[in-house]
Amino acid sequence: MDNQEPKEDRIEPVFRNGTVTAVGILLAFSLGFITHWAANPIPWQTYHLLAVVPILVGIALQMRALAMLLDTKSLQPSIYARANRIFITGLVFTASGVGLAILLDFFDIAAKSALPGA
């Protein structure tokens, strides 16, 4: 009788490397956006935190996913799948924050350019 557990299939390293590349590129875009926004000459207001917090949480999750994918343990399907879920969650947070940032800037500009009522 064989007491060894069946070996779990492994993710192909080339496939995992493509995922690492995609995660790295999207993380770089996320970091670039928050850096560009932070350097924006428009003064920050307290309500900007509505956008900044989800962006920063999303970036942190993307970084966690990248760290997991860079580990050789990510060749195990369960760890690979978990890293992908974390990355997608981070991407959703970041995209939501970016969307909020755009809306906040739009409404801020619209409020400042509105003509006073008669």
Image (cartoon, grey):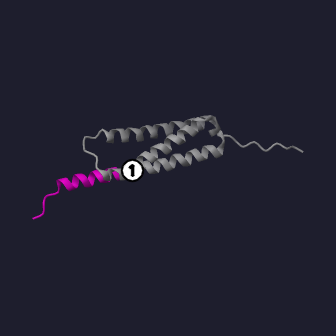
The kind of secondary structure the magenta stretch mainly shows is helix
Q: Residue furthest bottom?
A: 118
In this orientation, which residue lies closer to the viewer: 18 or 89? 89
Q: Amino acid at mark 1?
A: Gly
Figure label count? 1
Q: Position of residue 16 (x, y in %)?
A: 59, 38
Q: Residue furthest left?
A: 118
Q: Is residue 102 left or right of residue 55?
A: left
Pick the residue in front: 47 or 98: 47
- Tell me the magenta residue range: 96-118
Q: Position of residue 62 (x, y in %)?
A: 49, 43
Q: Does the segment drawn in magenta span residue 106?
A: yes
Residue 114, quarter of picture: bottom left
Q: Quadrant of residue 10?
A: top right
Q: Pointer 1: what residue?
A: 97
Location of residue 35 with respect to 44 vertically, above or below? above
Circle 1 packing at 10 Å, graded few (<14), some (14-19), many (20+), is: many
For label 1, the SS is helix
Classify the position of the N terminus by image quarter: top right
User: Which residue is located at x 39 percent, y 50 percent?
Assistant: 97
**Residue at the location (35% across, 50% down)?**
49
**Left or right relative to 62: residue 34:** left
> Taking 79 as reference, is 98 left or right?
left
